[in-house]
Image (cartoon, rainbow, N blue to C red):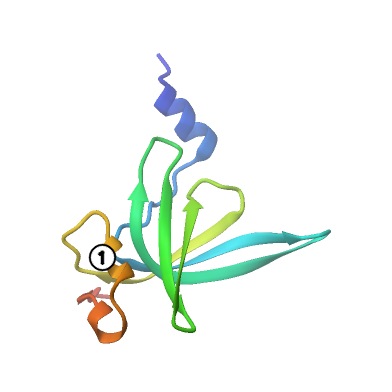
Amino acid sequence: MITISDLEKELVGDKNTPRVGERVSVHYEISEGEKSRIQKFEGLVIAVKNSSNRVTFTVRKESLGVGVERVFPLYSPFVKKVDVLKQHKVRRSKLYFQRELRGKAARLKEIRRKK
């Protein structure tokens, strides 16, 4: 018997969902008129919303002293690649408190990966 979740996995494929507290680099496609290009958005994952194949994650970065947040659907055809750059130790599922913090106060403890 085929379940709906099996069908969704078959149609969408398996991608690794970024976890909250990771510093990621998201490569996504932008169309400008007839041309298209790949742009990179690098920042901290502050929220992940899981709902079967409709997984979205919110990435926050500081750009010229202004906080910029962007929500990416994980299974969008425009999201080409998600690279994990660093992992941080977090004790919350949503890091919305990072919005009020600036500079050194916004630091998180990094988890070192063994190679």
Q: For the point 56% across and 55% down, which residue is it? A: 79
Please report the residue visible at 38 percent of the width from the left and 52 percent of the height from the top: 17
What quarter of the picture does the N terminus occupy? top left
Using residue 49 as the reference point, say whether residue 70 is left or right of it.
right
Q: Position of residue 36 (x, y in %)?
A: 74, 62
Residue type at numbered disc 1:
Phe
Left or right of 64? Residue 100 is left
Q: Position of residue 91 (x, y in %)?
A: 16, 60
Q: Which residue is mark 1?
A: 97
Looking at the rendered structure, the secondary structure element under dot 1 is: helix
The residue lying furthest to the right in this view is 34
Q: Residue at the spot x=27%, y=78% of the render?
A: 106
Which of these two is toward me, 31 or 82?
31
Q: Which x, y percent locates residue 75?
A: 51, 46
Q: Which residue is at the far top?
A: 1
Vertical relation: 102 (above or below) 50: below
Name the quarter where the C terminus is drawn.
bottom left
